[in-house]
Amino acid sequence: MYERLQFLPDGFIFEGLTPLNLKHMVFSGQAFRWEQKDKDSYVTVVKDRVIQGKQENDKLLVRLSALKDPLKDLAFVSNFFDLNTDYKNIEESLSQDPKLRQAVLYSSGNRIFKQDPWECIISYIISQNNSITNITRVIKRICKRYGPSLSYDGQKYYMFPRPEILADLKEIDLKECKAGYRCKYIIESSRKIADKEVDLEKIKEMQTSQAREELKKLPGVGDKVADCILLFAFQKYDSFPVDVWIKRAVEKLYFGGQKQKITTIQEFAAEKFKHMAGFVNQYLFLWARHNL
DNA sequence: TGCCAGGCCTTCC
DNA sequence: GGAAGGCATGGC
């Protein structure tokens, strides 16, 4: 929801975007391919395009490579940054819960990118039992080694490699990207996706629970990884991935600091937050990582 | 050194 | 159906 739009030769300026916090979005651990370019400017690669974003108060400046026609580019950008969703309403609504208010306030403007499903799946397979800095490094190595290169602003960037490419790798080669024991998951999951044994187009049309079971057919994808993929790539906002930070946050806010089983947290969130669970999750995650 | 990180898989009961 | 261990890598 923005108030005004300017067309640039290679991008757009969106004005009147509140709430928006690009820095939160970029470094909140939802996507792993953003880099800081200069002081307030960040760059990433989405499919075959380089995207540069910069925030000035309620303005979002976006430049991109591989220009098509302006309306298609506009649709692509506003979809990726989720600019047509009313986050003001979401944040106000969630803040009605006094236990959530501090987390929402702290994380305000942390919109959820709409990521490419294929890249998201492999990224979150890598994420298991791993740290955000290390996940970022591993993905970068994979793209640099196996992805087609792009040129933007005099610099080289890399696309995420296609499923067929990763599917044909030997484990011993992929190991050089330091994904460790997850390498065999990456290769086998890539093969299932390349062969359409797991069909990403069909998953888009499924209800959350069915989509979740379908994703879990991929090796290296369990409950938590599936929930991340559903939330970040399939817009299933009723999913609520529970990692150690979310667990801590929910235990502290809603269980008086008492340890709970993961299944208890999942059931609690589904019951309490319903179709808003995914948004709650994002606010809680960022808040917890910085404050707990 | 040991423990943790956006967990999953296998084994065993 | 659930508990326990193992697991690559890197930071603290």
Image (cartoon, coloured by chain):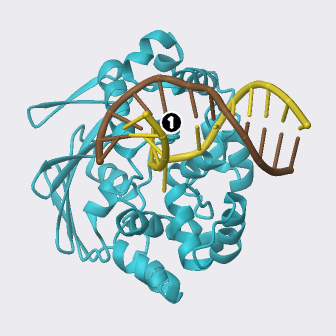
Chain colours: A cyan, B yellow, C brown
Q: Quadrant of the C terminus of chain A?
A: bottom left
Is A230 above or below relative to A163?
below
Q: Is residue A70 above or below residue A273?
A: above
Task: Work out whether residue A280 or residue A80 is closer to the camera in this orientation and state it.
Answer: A280
Which residue type carries mark 1?
Answer: Trp
Q: Position of residue A114 (x, y in %)?
A: 44, 53
Q: In the image, residue A25 lies at what x, y percent?
A: 33, 60
In the image: residue C5, left or right of residue A84: right
Q: What is the count of numbered marks?
A: 1
Left or right: where A126 falls relative to A75? right
Residue A99's place in the image compared with B5, above or below, is below
Residue found at x 72% / y 65%: A264
Q: Quadrant of residue B8?
A: top right
Disc 1: CA contacts within 10 A as few (<14), some (14-19) or many (>=20): some
> Would residue A207 be visible to someone looking at this image?
no
- Percent position of residue A287, x then y: 40, 69
Chain letter behind tag 1: A
In the image, taking residue A211 as reference, residue A282 lies left or right, namely left
Circle 1 — which element?
A: helix
Residue A236 visible somewhere in the drawing = yes
Residue in the picture at 60% in, 52% down? A227
Residue A141 image-quadrant placement: top left
* Residue nearest the observer in this picture, A287 or A193: A287
* Residue positioned 58% across, 68% down in the render: A277
Q: Quadrant of residue A75?
A: bottom left
Quadrant the N terminus of chain A occupies: bottom left
Image coords of residue A272 (percent x, y): 66, 77
Q: Which residue is mark 1?
A: A118
**Does residue A232 appear left or right of residue A36 in this picture?**
right
The residue drawn where x is 62% and y is 38% is: A221
